[in-house]
């Protein structure tokens, strides 16, 4: 079978372009730890306050008996509850976010934490925030007139300072 050299050349170029795009996707997913949502968990967004997990007293950071850290937040027009959190750096943390009304998003700049928060579902992200500092938590899905004002803060502190603080809280409490 005869293939024109010009056709061969362009076929090779198209394969190279496709190969480049596929390897870019693979690198971003494997090296930068960017994944599609792996878990589907439903929740009644209209009755969050009646669920045990997302009742007001359970929001924020909690450490279970095995030392596993979970941060629970509720997104609602136009803010995140709690408004401010202090969490340790270089520590695996599971973030569980729910919406009390419409679709919101959550993005922490300079980290790989970025997900949609869809009413009716729990958005779960497990990650480590590497560098201590002040981070804004920004809603990145248009959710209404107050969307631009929907944000909160996370303070990431060195792990040893956080442990000290935790022990202090236990001794004082
Ligand atoms: Cu919430 Cu935009």
Image (cartoon, helix red, strand yellow):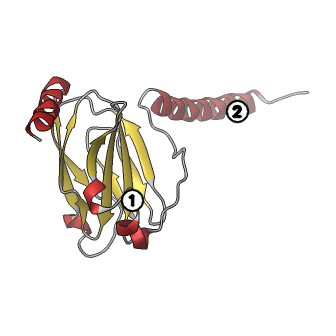
Q: Say which residue label 1 marks.
A: 52
Q: Are marks 2 and 1 in contact (CB under 8 Å)?
A: no
Question: In the image, 44: left or right of 144?
Answer: right
- Examine the rendered structure and indicate whether residue 75 appears above or below residue 46: above
Residue 42 lies, in percent from the top left, at 52, 60
Q: Where is residue 69 drawn, in percent x and y?
A: 32, 37
From the viewer's perspective, is 134 left or right of 110?
A: left
Q: Which mark is residue 95?
A: none
Q: Where's residue 50, x and y in %?
A: 38, 68
Q: Quadrant of residue 167?
A: top left
Q: Position of residue 49 (x, y in %)?
A: 34, 67
SS category of the residue bearing label 1: loop
Q: Nearer the viewer, residue 87 or 142?
A: 87
Mark 2 burial class by Cα count in 10 Å: few <14, some 14-19, many 20+: few
Residue sitting at x 38%, y 64%: 99
Q: Residues within 10 Å of mark 1 (few under 14, many from 20)?
A: few
Q: Residue furthest bottom?
A: 145
The residue drawn where x is 37% and y is 72% is: 101
Secondary structure of the residue carrying tag 2 is helix
Query: Would you say 12 lies left or right of 147 here?
Result: right
Decide if ligand 1 comes within 8 Å of the CB at mark 1: no
- Tell which of 54 and 136 is nearer to you: 54
Which quarter of the image is occupied by the N terminus? top right
Q: Earlier in the sequence, mark 2 or mark 1?
A: 2
**Left or right: where 34 falls relative to 167:** right
Quadrant where the image shows the C terminus = top left
Q: Looking at this rendering, what residue extends furthest in the right direction?
A: 1
Which of 69 and 78 lies nearest the eye of the viewer?
Answer: 69
Q: Which residue is mark 2?
A: 11
User: Distance of mark 2 from mark 1, alpha carbons?
Assistant: 59 Å
Residue 45 to residue 167: above or below: below
Q: Residue at x 41, y 31 (%)?
A: 32
């Amino acid at each position: 079978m005869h293939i024109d050299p010009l056709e061969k050349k362009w076929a090779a170029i198209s394969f190279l372009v496709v190969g480049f795009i596929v390897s870019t996707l693979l690198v971003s997913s494997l090296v930068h730890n960017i994944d599609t949502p792996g878990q589907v968990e439903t929740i009644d967004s209209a009755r969050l306050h009646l669920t045990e997990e997302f009742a007001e007293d359970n929001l924020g950071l909690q450490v279970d008996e095995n030392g596993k850290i979970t941060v629970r937040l509720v997104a609602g027009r136009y803010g995140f509850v709690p408004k401010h959190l202090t969490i340790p750096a270089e520590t695996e943390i599971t973030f569980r976010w729910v919406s009390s009304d419409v679709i919101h998003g959550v993005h922490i700049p300079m980290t790989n934490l970025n997900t949609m928060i869809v009413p009716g579902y729990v958005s779960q992200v497990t990650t480590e925030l590497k560098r201590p500092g002040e981070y804004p938590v920004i809603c990145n899905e248009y959710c209404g007139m107050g969307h631009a004002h929907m944000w909160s803060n996370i303070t990431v502190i060195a792990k040893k300072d956080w442990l000290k603080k935790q022990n202090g809280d236990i001794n004082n409490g």
